[in-house]
Amino acid sequence: MIFAICDDTSETLDMLKNALQKRYGNNCDCVCFSEAGKLKYYIENKQLPDCIIMDICIGDKNGIVELRKIQQKLIDSPVIFITGYPEYCQDIFIDFEPFGLLTKPIDFDKLYYYTDRIAAGVGQRDVRISVTLGRERNVLKSSNIMYIESEKRKIIYHTKDGNFEEYSKMSDALDKLKIGFIRCHKSFAVNYKHVKIFSNEKIVMYDNTVIPVSRMYGESAKSRFYTLKSNSLGM
């Protein structure tokens, strides 16, 4: 399991690295960065870590803003923010989905609460489903599916890598995908992790696709969305 830790003080970096290595031993690999740009380069060019621990104020940079620049790449990588300035905490909920928040001095019980949940889910966060149309068969990762659409007798899986179709019903497709997908319309269901804005009339995805919300599904869909968001934060 790879933790990427970004903080502008060596003391905090060493403290977090030692705490995680003590907790997870040989199952833990920590990569540390004192600058937000170096973490960004690592994620874009080397490897997506299993968890990112990011200081909100790092040098003259805002850690939230820096991660927003590469937000599309972070769908599978939970982020725990740390800060010595609680007054800035509300900013993490603007167009972002953090896994958790720690304030300084760091409460290690709370740190381990978050990281234990992440460690338990490593390798299990993705559901892989088989999608078959004629002789063409594709295996899709649920995290790559932004939303699904029912059109006539087909289900269309809209993913970051293109669209895939099969003859199926919406209810059967949702059964395959399990948790994380919300039906918001008779013809649409969305992956909550790809949702940027959820209103009474529409959903805006991170790629700016607009999905309709119907009266029939709207109330339950919105409630489900906020439940999933809250659970992801350990609330």
Image: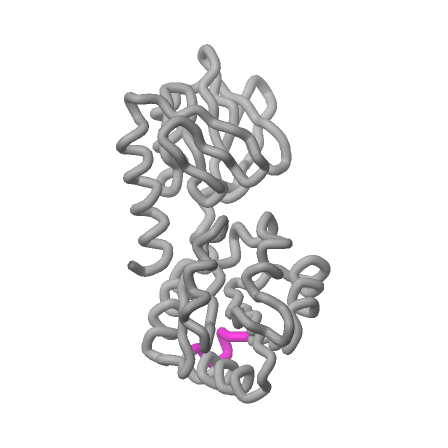
How many numbered dots are placed on residues in this image?
A: 0
Where on the picture, by quarter, is residue 101?
bottom left
Residue toward you, 73 or 140 = 73
**Residue at 41% in and 71% down:** 86
Say whether residue 215 is magenta.
no
Q: Which residues are magenta?
A: 24-29
Residue 25 part of the magenta-drawn span = yes
- Position of 84 with respect to 13 (left or right) is left
* In the image, farthest residue toward the front: 87
Q: Is residue 137 visible?
A: yes
Pick the residue in front: 97 or 137. 97
The front one of 126 and 67 is 67
Tell which residue pokes out farthest to the top in this image.
152
Across and down, in percent, residue 191 comes to 44, 38
182 left or right, relative to 18: left
- Decide: is 78 above or below 3: above
Q: Position of residue 181 (x, y in %)?
A: 39, 37
Q: Is residue 146 above or below residue 58?
A: above
- Frontmost residue, 98 versus 116: 98
User: Height in image: 224 above or below 102?
Assistant: above
Q: Residue at 52%, 84% (x, y): give it.
A: 12
At horizontal 64% and vertical 72% (from top left) the residue drawn is: 60
Q: Residue 63 appears at what percent x and percent y? A: 57, 66
By secondary structure, the bulk of the magenta-drawn segment is best described as helix
Q: Is residue 226 left or right of residue 11?
A: left
Which percent across, then down, holds residue 70? 63, 54
Query: Quarter of the image containing the C terminus?
Result: bottom left
* 87, above or below 167, in the image: below
Q: Could you say which quadrant of the image residue 57 lies in?
A: bottom right
Q: Residue at x 37, y 80 (%)?
A: 108
Please indicate, yes or no, whether residue 1 appears anywhere in the rendered image: no
